[in-house]
Amino acid sequence: MDREMKIKAFALLALAPLSGFAADFVLTDAEQIKDASSIQKSVDAIFAKVAQCVDRKLAEPSRCFCLYPVELEDFKKVFATVIKNHPEWKDKIVYFEGRTEGHTKGHNLGFVGLQRMSEMKCEK
């Protein structure tokens, strides 16, 4: 399985599948999009590290998150702040569009899966 497929497979396991579901919230407000983007960036950062871990076979995919405590804690802080600011997003799917490398890209954030990720405990 190539690297991209490993990442996608792990992401689907870690964050509940979103296919077939309509977003509960479609964001158009700039401040809401900024908050959603902050979570997306945090998720992207930790998934990039997890992909490296999986590629190098450093640990089981489910344990790879724990090898990057700085990124995991950063995600948890961002998640907590966003949920505090937008409690209505809890257990919902939020869709927003953002510009990446000159292209508009749509993002779905499944807060059920993100909640699970924020509750992840790692052995020390």
Image: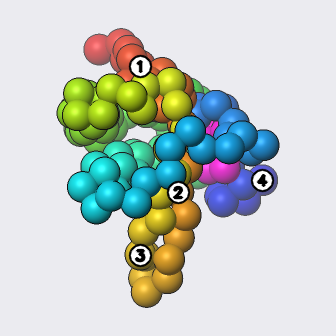
SS state under label 3:
strand
Disc number placed over residue 99 in the picture, else none: 3
- Mark 1 is on which residue type? Met
N-term mark: 4 or 1? 4
- Which SS does the magenta portion mostly show? helix
Disc number placed over residue 107 in the picture, else none: 2
Identify the residue at horizontal 41%, vertical 75% (top origin). 99
N-term mark: 2 or 1? 2
Image position of 38 with respect to 77: above or below: below
Disc number placed over residue 1 in the picture, else none: 4
The reply to whether residue 51 is in sight is no
- Asked whether 99 or 28 is in front, the reply is 28
The reply to whether residue 67 is in sight is yes
Q: Give the CA separation, mark 4 to mark 3.
A: 30 Å
Identify the residue at horizontal 42%, vertical 82% (top origin). 101
Residue 51 horizontal side relative to residue 121, left or right: right
